Amino acid sequence: MKKILLIIVLVSSIFLFTACPLPGPPEPTLLQCVTAEHGWILAEGTITPAYQTADGENITDLMDFLSACEKDDVIYFDDHGVERIKTNARCAEGQGLQDAEIKTLWRLDNAGTPNFIYMQLPFFYEYDDEGHVIGLDAEEEDCKMLDITKDEFRLVYTDSSESGIYTFYMIYRDPKKVESYR
């Protein structure tokens, strides 16, 4: 009888310990995702309505609008509110960012459950009188945060300019997971 009871206890113990999976690593917090060490690179983007370029072309794919030297800019956010934009390929003079790294500020609208991130988008510029890029625009962009994971950051930004109101849908990814960056 004792043997049967012992066998039942042993079998029950085996089922008990094998039925429960071991806990994995905890999911990263929103702040940990934003400040991910890998940084963020623009992988996809659209513009609505179509944006008309200086030569009359209507663009809806943001990636078609940006030059090659703008597509490899990596954004890093630190947990002290500093945003670093690292340019990898230098743009031709007057066409994009010339500095290898630019520092600016970023912040969330609500630390608990943020809806917006206030940041500098690396493709909004200030221009000189001749139309050459002289740096990033002075304003921070208020981007609505649609979704963020450790590998992907989805944002929407609406820009009101002299030429109209445009909505930019952007997907930033871990640079190592973007084919054009590797």
Image (spheres, rainbow, N blue to C red):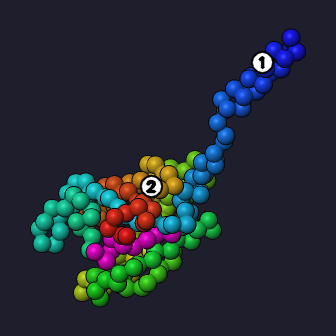
Q: For numbered disc 1, what is the local secondary structure?
A: helix
User: Could you tell me the amino acid type at mark 2?
Assistant: Glu
Viewport quadrant of the N terminus: top right
Q: Depth-wise, is mark 1 or mark 2 nearer the camera?
A: 1
Q: Is residue 73 magenta?
A: yes
Residue at the disc numbered 1? 8
Q: Residue furthest top?
A: 1
Q: Residue at x 23, y 67 (%)?
A: 65
Q: Residue at x 28, y 82 (%)?
A: 95
**Crowd rating for badge 2 (residues with CA inside 10 Å; few <14, some 14–19, many 20+):** many
Pick whichever, 60 or 13, lies toward us.
13
| Image x and y of residue 9, in percent | 80, 21
Q: Residue furthest right?
A: 2
Left or right: residue 176 compared with residue 150: left
| Image x and y of residue 102, in percent | 47, 79
Q: Is residue 4 magenta?
A: no
Viewport quadrant of the C terminus: bottom left
| Residue 120 in view of the camera | no
Decide whether the magenta segment is chiefly helix, strand or loop.
Answer: loop
| Image x and y of residue 163, in percent | 23, 64
Residue at the disc numbered 2? 152
Pick whichever, 3 or 147, lies toward us.
3
Q: Quadrant of residue 94?
A: bottom left
Earlier sequence position, callout 1 versus callout 2 = 1
Q: For numbered disc 2, what is the local secondary structure?
A: strand
Task: Quote the CA–CA distance across marks 1 and 2.
Answer: 49 Å
Q: Residue at x 62, y 65 (%)?
A: 79
Q: Which stretch appears magenta? A: 68-76
Residue 122's label in the rendered image is: none
User: Could you tell me the amino acid type at mark 1?
Assistant: Ile
